[in-house]
Image (tube, rainbow, N blue to C red):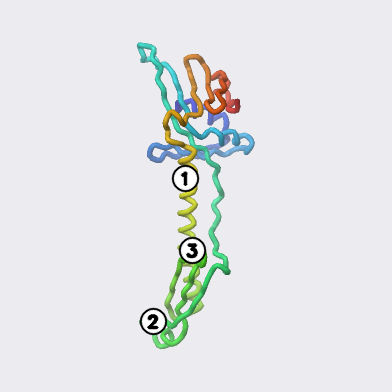
Amino acid sequence: MASVLWWLLAIWMDRTVFDKINNMVVLELVGDEDKLNPLLHESGGHRWQRVPPTERKGRIHTSTVTVVVMEVMPVEKFKIKDCDISVKFSRGTGPGGQHKNKTDSCVHMTHIPTGITARIDGRSQHKNKEVARELLESRVSKLEKEKAYSKIEKERKDKAGSGQRGDKIRTYRVKDGMVQDHRTDSKVPLRKVLSGCLEF
């Protein structure tokens, strides 16, 4: 089954980035958008049925692989809008001299949409504002990345399905040389699919 998928990918892609994580093989396909678009409909279970050369009784063996196809979204640097930040000042505390303790040098920043805060206490109010802003952006950016990851993970699981028989989308039958698409109940010769035809 794996060799067939590699064969199909070799036909469809111009370049690939390969990685293996646990039991998953991760591929980044790079090529013409019109050429790769048909692959977006290949998420789901693919079954490869054949009679191995070592099978003496002619029994059909089935191998299954779950495919998930997702578009790579560009990573944008997170930037907080000024209107989404509340800034307050207070007297500094702790060691640092009378200047720190008698001026409003301590900076409290709050990201209004999320409620995330950052507090920096130092002698220079100007410097404290810069550091507080950097810290706030870092904390909010982390939250946004976690939300984005959760969204991507949910999409991946939805596309992968449960991996059970009911989630299969295509069966490749070597014995009679046919491929059946279970979404449309259509059938085409296996050789046609191996030549790169995925839309039928």
Q: Earlier in the sequence, mark 2 or mark 3?
A: 2
> Label 2 vs label 3: CA separation?
27 Å
Which residue matches tag 1?
154
Q: How crowded is the residue under tag 3: few (<14 C-alpha within 10 Å), some, or many (20+)?
A: few
Which residue matches tag 2?
93
Disc 3 on helix, strand or loop? loop
- Residues marked 2 and 3 touching at CB (< 8 Å): no
Q: Residue at x 36, y 11 (%)?
A: 57
Q: Residue at x 55, y 67 (%)?
A: 84
Disc 1 on helix, strand or loop? helix
In this view, 71 is above or below 79: above
Disc 2 on helix, strand or loop? loop
In this view, 142 is above or below 194: below
Total numbered labels = 3
Q: How crowded is the residue under tag 2: few (<14 C-alpha within 10 Å), some, or many (20+)?
A: some
Q: Earlier in the sequence, mark 3 or mark 1?
A: 3
Which residue matches tag 3?
114
Furthest residue toward right: 34
Indicate the quadrant containing the C terminus: top left, top right, bottom left or bottom right: top right
Indicate the quadrant containing the N terminus: top left, top right, bottom left or bottom right: top left
Q: Residue at x 50, y 67 (%)?
A: 111
> Label 3 vs label 1: CA separation?
22 Å
Compare residues 36 and 11 and report the one nearer the observer. 36
Residue 94, quarter of the rendered image:
bottom left
Q: Amino acid at mark 2?
A: Thr
Q: Residue at x 39, y 12 (%)?
A: 58
Q: Amino acid at mark 3?
A: Thr
Q: Earlier in the sequence, mark 1 or mark 2?
A: 2
The spot of residue 191 in percent (x, y) is: 55, 19
Compare residues 79 and 131 and report the one nearer the observer. 79
Q: Amino acid at mark 1?
A: Lys
